[in-house]
Each structure stands twice: as structure tokens, then as C-alpha cells.
Image: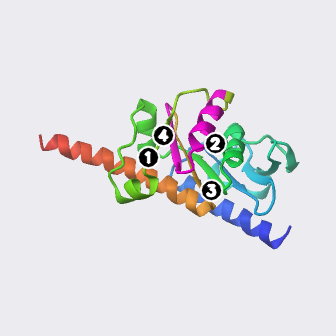
Amino acid sequence: MSVEKDEVLRELFKISKRVGERGWAPGSSGNISVRIPGKSLIYIKVTGKNMLDLTPSDILTLDMDGNIVEGVGKPSKEVRFHLGIYRVRGDVGAVIHSHPPYASAYAIIGIPIPLKTAPGKYVLKRIPEVEFAPRGSKELAEGVIKAFQDPQVKAVTLKGHGIVAVGATLQEAYNITEWVEDAAREAFLTSLLAKGLE
């Protein structure tokens, strides 16, 4: 394995573990992928594995058509939208799908996350909502890909489900996830405070 590929994998494991430690991917939910620099290939988590403790055998190398180039197993059930985002967004180098509780609560009840925090207003700007479709379905992938065709979109909520965040790097995709969750948490808490002052 080349030094560059080794570094990309180390970063993937580090960010995946952080997502797991935050409780954003309970059980085997959530998925993560990263574009391999200079190649039309991605690393993606296999299905059924916990984000908290991924190992090299839990990562597949895929081409942009979804063919397995290296590794054993089945890719994440959301592989369609991971690949689709990379196809329509050349600026995206990493994709994280997770279920942070406050952001997921807004997604589950189908209310857009109010963007009242500074990162919400000036970094995220808007978070489109993707209509409900079964997990792993072609319909869900099409909705996600369509939303990310806008180059300004950094995250979306999946109605009844969770969120998807992107970035040029894994760290950036993680930061976007954190900012989405922070915006949702602050919106929820301020709404409670406002009700208490009525």
C-alpha cells in the first residue's frame, strides 16, 4: 500500500471513529466514503459494520460505476448516493451519512433545521430536505443526488431518516456534520427557552 493511500485510510478510520464516539451512527447505521486523490476510485465502508471500530477489511475500493476493485464484502446500502454525489460534484472528496440526534429529530418530523448559528448562516446557508424514500433505494439516491447538484449545498436532511454531509476532505465533511447538529441543537434549545418566556 502506498504512503498516500495509507494516509487516506488512517484519516477515514479516525473520522469514522469520531462519528461513532459521538453516537451519530448507532449499531451498524451510517456510512462513510472518501475519494482517492488523483483516481476515479473511492473507499467506502462495507455494510453491516459499526463506524466506531472499522478495520482495513471493512473498507472496499470501488470504481465510479460501483464495481469492487479491492476488498471483500458488500458496500454500504447507500452506495448509490455516495457515487452519485462524486459524479455531480467534482469538489467533493468525502461523504458522511449519519444520524446525529437533534438534526435527525428535525429530519424525522420533516421540519427544516432553522439556521440561527453563525456557521449555520454563513457556512451551511441552507439545508435542503430530501423527500422520504426507503433506505438504500434508487429513489432515495436520486433525491440526494439532485439536492447536491447545487454546488453550494453542503448537507441535506433525509426526511424520516438522518443527514448527509459532504466536504473536500473527510475532516471538512465531519465539520459540516457537526455544524448541522449544532444548528439543530441550538434551534431546539432556543425554541424551548422562547416557550418558557411566553
Mark 4 vs mark 3, foreground winner is: 4
Horizontal relation, residue 110 to residue 45: left or right: left
**Residue tagged 3:** 16
Residue at left offset 59%, top offset 33%: 143
Type of amino acid at the residue the image marks with label 3: Ser
Find residue 128 and name its label.
Answer: 4
- In 3D space, how far apart are the residues under numbered discs 2 and 3 (Cα atoms)? 12 Å
Is mark 4 in CB contact (under 8 Å) with mark 3?
no
Is mark 3 in CB contact (under 8 Å) with mark 1?
no
Q: Which residues are magenta?
A: 139-160
**Residue tagged 1:** 126
Q: Nearer the viewer, residue 154 or 160?
A: 154
The earlier-in-sequence mark between 2 and 3 is: 3
The earlier-in-sequence mark between 2 and 4 is: 2
Q: How many marks on residues? A: 4
Residue at left offset 85%, top offset 43%: 67
Q: Residues within 10 Å of mark 3 (few under 14, many from 20)?
A: many
The earlier-in-sequence mark between 4 and 3 is: 3
Find residue 28 and name its label.
Answer: 2
x, y percent for residue 77:
70, 36
- When the figure is inspected, residue 191 is found, relative to residue 168, above or below; the finding is above
